[in-house]
Structures are given as C-alpha cells and as structure tokens.
Amino acid sequence: MQPLRLIIACAFLVCVPAAALNAATGDAAPSAAQPAALAASGASPAVPAEQGIPHSAQSLGHQGGFITNSMLVTWIVAVGVILFARFATRKIQKVPSGAQNFWEWLVEGLYGFLESIIGSRLVKKTFWFFATIFIFILATNWFGLIPGAGTIGWGHQGEHGFEVTRPLLRAGNADLNMTFAMAMIFFACWTVWALQFSGVKGTFLHIFGPQGDSTGVIKYFMIVVFFAVGFLEMLSIAFRPISLSFRLYGNMFAGENLLEAMSNLVQHPAWARVVFGALLPVPFYFMELLVGFIQAVVFMLLTAVFTALICTHEEEAGEEHH
Amino acid sequence: MTHLILFGSIGGDLLKTADQFGLDWPHFIAQVISFSLVAGLLVKFAYKPILTVLAERRQRIAEGLANADKIKAELARTEALQQEVLEKASVQATKLIEEARAAAARVQEQETQKAIVQAEQIISKAREATTLERQRMLIELKREVAALVVQTTAVVSGKVLTPADQQRLVEETRRQLAA
C-alpha cells in the first residue's frame, strides 16, 4: 500500500505543471506581463530592470544594512507562528476548543498524511521537519499576499506618483536565501536520516547497488550498469536542494511580479489607475493563495518522498521484523 | 578531463545564477538560523504537547473501547445470569404457588370439617336444650293442671280438701296426663 501512495504522491507532484514551469522560468512571468505594463506606462522595453520586483531581497534603510525586507517578513511570520502555537498549547484541555482545536487538527492532519506516505516509524523521527516546512512555507507565502507587502517602503516621486523602489516587506520565499536555507537544512537532515535508517553501507548499496535478482554474466553487467546509474543518482541528489529552492523561489517571485504587473497594468487616466490597480489583482490573489498552498504541499511532499525513498527499505524490513 | 571542465562550467554558471538572484552566505546562514529556531520552538511549544495529548487521547479512546467491550461482555453475562435467576425464580414461584394452593385446599378442607363438626355440635346442643325446655314446660304444665284440678274439685264439691286429698288428686292427674 505504501509504494502505491508514494507513486500517487509523485504523480501529484508531476501533475502540477504550473509549479514546475514557474520554477524553471522564475522570471518568465514578469516578462509575459511586462509588455502590457510597458505599453501602458510608455516606458522603453530596453530597460527591463526598472520593471517589476528586484530578483533579490533588499536591505532595510538607506545604508544597506544586513537585515533585508524578506528577513523581516520571515521573522514576523516566525514570531507569529510561534506565538500562535504557544497560545494554542498554553492551557491544553482534554476537550479541545478554539486555537487548540485548530492546532490539533493541523498537527494531527499533517501527521496522518505524512504517516500514510513515509510510514509510521519514519514519521516519528521526521515529522517535526516536514510539519515545520509546510506550516512555515504556507504562512510565509500567505503573509506575502497581505496588502502592503511590496507596496509600502522607500521610493521616490515618479511619473505616476510615488514609486516604491525598496519595499519594507517582501514575501519570505521570494528570497533565494530563505528557500535555499530550507533546502540545505533538508539535505543535511536527509543525510542524517539516511545514515540512521540505512547505515553507510545500506545507503551506498541503495544508490549504487544492483536491483533485482540476476545471475551469471548478466549479474556483473547489472552491477556495472547500476554503479553508473548510481552516479546519476548522486547528481540528482546533489541537485535536489537547487531544484527545491529554485522551484519555491521561482513560484513566489513570479507571483509577486504577477500581482505587481496586474496592479500597474492600467496607468491612465488616474481614476482608472486607482480602480483597475485595486480590482485587477483580485483574481490573481486567489490564484496566489492556491499557489502558496500548493508550493507548501509540493515542498513538503517532495522532501518527504525523497526521505522515504532512501529510508523505506530498512523501515519495511523493520516493520516486517516486528 | 572534459567532464571536469563541464562540471566546472556548470558550477560556475550555478554560482553566477545564485549571485544574480541574491544568494549570499551571510543571509543564507541567517535564514538557516531563523528556520532552525522556528523548527526548534515549534517542536517545543507545538508538536510535543499536541502529539502527547493526541497520544494520550488515542490511549484513552482505546481504553474506553476496551472498557466498553468489557462492559458489554459483563452486561451480556449479567443478563444471562439475570435470565437464569428469573427462570429459577419463576420455577420456584410456580412451585410455591402450587404448594400454597395445596396448603390452602388442605386448610379449607380442615376448616370446613371443623365448621361441620361445630355446626353439628351446635345443632345437637340446640336439640338437647329444646328437649330439656320441653320437659321443663311439660312438668310445669302438669303442675299447673294438677293445681287446676284440685282447685276445680274443691269448687265443684263445695268442701275443703285436705292435704291428703289434694295429694291424691295431684297424683291421679299426673298419672292420667302421663298416660
């Protein structure tokens, strides 16, 4: 039953084309929206750096300090999530209600979902990471949709009024440092879990060892083939943090740019700029709500599946043994 | 060698891309610390207490279900016992009723016999009393008739009768009445 769930989970991940496409072309969305924005504003397309949101997070203040706008959002979300969790669990009742009920529902739902994918033994060890990944990414993604994020900050008086060039708040996952940090933490945890569950030999055999029951000359041929495949697998494993981080970053960055482009699509006359600037992004806000959720699920599922793939053999053997 | 150059080229491109998207070590490490802190605090404040509560609740539910099964079995056993007791009681009650009926019939018979005997005794006593009363009345009547004969004789004969005459008349009268 568990391999079937793994396959379904993988199929689900493959069937999120928007996520994959957006991840592969992190700056494609703004480029699609740019012509319209440029045409409306009358700016020259020869200076795309002036359009949309910058690729990287910006420092707060004029002096270029260490703290960036995405770090600020990350900390606000972190403090908010921790305070809510503390509030929900400060007086735990036998019959839950309110915040405790919601938190129990979230934790229990995630636990059951992950248990169905990676098994009961593995989930006990790894639940903290996957749950944190999901909750933190989801909260950060949705926090970035709050009006004011990306629109309040420092700037200058431009052709069409005040233009924000350095926003106070930037979606936390629209910063590659954040997404890469999460991906690298996962990579470190994945390595530790693989060694804990499979051992050095088991992990090596899992990557390089031949699969199936072959005999004779075929067996030696398969050893060579699977050893070569192992190098490809190593390459794939090495690129996982990059694909994970760029997928999430690309989707969130593209979403920010899309909302920015929709807000600035109509510039003239002034009343139309106000009306359409407020109304046009609304459908895309709903889409970004969905994208934010899907990206949180995708990141969690992918990391869970990667972990299950390297640890499943030992776990299944352990379960059968018990 | 070609592969090394290729990997080197890919690595260089990756670093260039990373740099283009603002990836730098200090901010990367800061975010690693931020996420680790969030994870650690969530484990302490959110996951552990909730998972403990959920585990306890699961255990309580399992115990409750086990107790419910136990109670159900106990109830079934009690019901069976109750049924058995009721059946025994029913049998005993039937027996008691039959015994009571038999005893009542016996008592009724005895009382009836007693009543008959008492009635016969009463009738017998009444008959004796009637007989005695009749005899007493006959004696009284004879005495009265003898007195009337002596009185009538004295009036008719116009002489005073001596005690001997009176005695003789009385006896004569008694003798005739007895005949």
Image: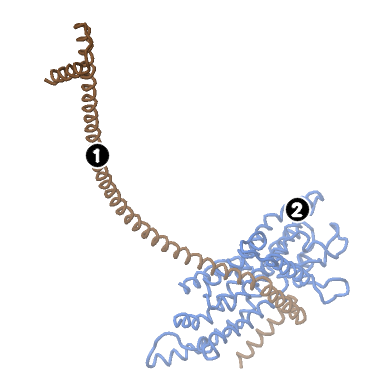
Chain colours: A blue, B brown
**Image mark for residue A232:** none
Q: Is residue A270 left or right of residue A188?
A: right
Work out which quarter of the rendered image holds the N terminus of chain A and state it.
Answer: bottom left
x, y (%) of residue A116? 52, 71
Which chain is indicated by disc 1? B
Q: Is residue B58 above or below residue B90?
A: below
**Image mark for residue A278:** 2
Residue assigned mark 1: B112
x, y (%) of residue A208? 51, 88
Tell me what residue is drawn at x 68 percent, y 81 percent.
B14
In what element is the residue under mark 2? helix
**Front one among A179 and B3:** A179
Amino acid residing under circle 1: Thr
Circle 1 residues within 10 Å: few <14, some 14–19, many ≥20: few
Quarter of the rendering containing residue A183 = bottom right
Tell me what residue is drawn at x 81 percent, y 66 percent.
A168
Amino acid residing under circle 2: Ala
x, y (%) of residue A223? 46, 91
**Front one among A88 and A269:** A88
In what element is the residue under mark 1? helix
x, y (%) of residue A311? 53, 81
